[in-house]
Image (tube, rainbow, N blue to C red):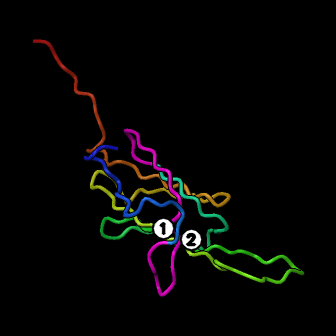
Amino acid sequence: MDDNTQLTERKTDAIARRDETRGGRRAITPAVDVFEDAQGVTLWADLPGVTKDKLEVHVHDGNLYIEAKAVVPTPEGLRLQHVEVREPHFARTFTLSADFDSSKIDATLQDGVLKLTVPRREEARPRRIEVRSG
């Protein structure tokens, strides 16, 4: 991505670490890979243990929000002695450039990986200009 099509700037350089407090509890920043082409951007977010019903993706005021809660089942017959993160809460925010069409974002979740496709607005896509001789 270049300066004109920047999707976001990370506030930290840590990946999958505990981040800001949300609702009185700390959130884990999920690792996200971002790929860009002429059509738009695709984000792949690692959300282990998250199911569709515990995932919320929304756009508001030019920001894309990902929030999720993972379910970590305790195997039958085992008793927990020590738990650092019992119900992990994931949260990540991206600022969308005006070049992207937030009304056409597509989201799929499979095996704990969220795929978000954010298309570029038609007028922001590169186009070839025909040159005539004459």
Furthest residue toward bottom: 24
Task: Name the residue rendered at 39%, 46% in the picture.
Answer: 40
Q: Position of residue 34 (x, y in %)?
A: 46, 49
Q: Position of residue 114 (x, y in %)?
A: 57, 58
> Does residue 2 lie above or below 127 as drawn?
below
Q: Which residues are magenta?
A: 19-41
The circle on residue 131 is none
Task: Name the residue rendered at 16%, 17% in the picture.
Answer: 132
Q: Position of residue 86 (x, y in %)?
A: 67, 80
The circle on residue 66 is 1
Under tag 2, what secondary structure?
strand
Rendered image quadrant of residue 77 = bottom right
Q: 45 or 123, which lies in front? A: 45
Is 5 covered by the magenta stretch? no
Main secondary-structure element of the magenta-colored stretch: strand
Furthest residue toward top: 134
Dot 2 amino acid type? Leu
Q: Look at the numbered discs 1 and 2 and tell me whether their residues touch, using CB distance below 8 Å.
A: yes
Distance from Cα at disc 1 to Cα at disc 2: 8 Å
Under tag 1, what secondary structure?
strand
Task: Name the residue rendered at 47%, 72% in the picture.
Answer: 19
Q: Position of residue 79 (x, y in %)?
A: 83, 84
Of the residues under marks 1 and 2, which one precedes in the sequence? 2
Task: Using a 10 Å C-alpha cutoff, classify the residue at mark 1 as few (fewer than 14 neighbours), some (14 to 19) or many (20 or more).
Answer: some
> Does residue 99 lie above or below 62 as drawn?
above
Task: Using a 10 Å C-alpha cutoff, classify the residue at mark 2 as few (fewer than 14 neighbours), some (14 to 19) or many (20 or more).
Answer: some
Q: Which residue is mark 2?
A: 55
Q: 24 or 45, which lies in front? A: 24
Give left or right: position of 101 versus 22.
left
Q: 74 or 103, which lies in front? A: 74
Give left or right: position of 67 versus 62.
right
